[in-house]
Amino acid sequence: MDSCLYDLEEYECGLRVDGPSIKYLLYADDQVILAASACGLHEMINIMNESVRKRCMKINVDKTKLMVFERGESTTECDVLIGGEKAE
């Protein structure tokens, strides 16, 4: 999985927190991808999906969850497709 993360390193996205941009968090075999926008998240997931496909692996869409945090009362619908399947 480490080699798949290198593909995200080259992408200019992530969440800026007091300076550096944070693209992902890792714990054991879990991964969290961080993005400042729904569009950025979708793009990062596409990059990750392509990276794992090159290595003959597949993202488990059933175990993939999305969370959107926003300021204020507005809400953004974030439909992300992974290999044609909608992630929750």
Image (cartoon, grey):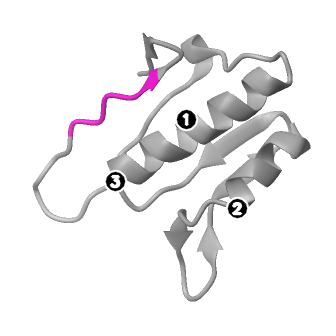
Residue 3: image quadrant is top right
Q: Which mark is residue 46?
A: 1
> What is the CA distance from the residue labelled 3 to the residue labelled 1?
20 Å
What type of secondary structure mainly makes up the magenta span? loop
Amino acid, disc 1 = Asn
Q: Residue furthest front?
A: 54
- Relative to 41, is 4 on the left or the right? right
The residues colored magenta run 77-81
Q: Tell me if label 3 and label 2 are in contact, CB under 8 Å.
A: no
Amino acid, disc 3 = Phe
50 relative to 26, above or below: above
Density class for disc 2 (Cα within 10 Å; few <14, some 14-19, many ≥20) is few
Amino acid, disc 2 = Glu
* Quadrant the C terminus occupies: top left
Q: Which type of secondary structure does the marked residue at label 2 adopt? A: loop
Residue ID for mark 2: 10
**Residue at (57, 66) in percent of width and height:** 12
63 relative to 9, above or below: above
**Residue at (75, 49) in percent of width and height:** 7
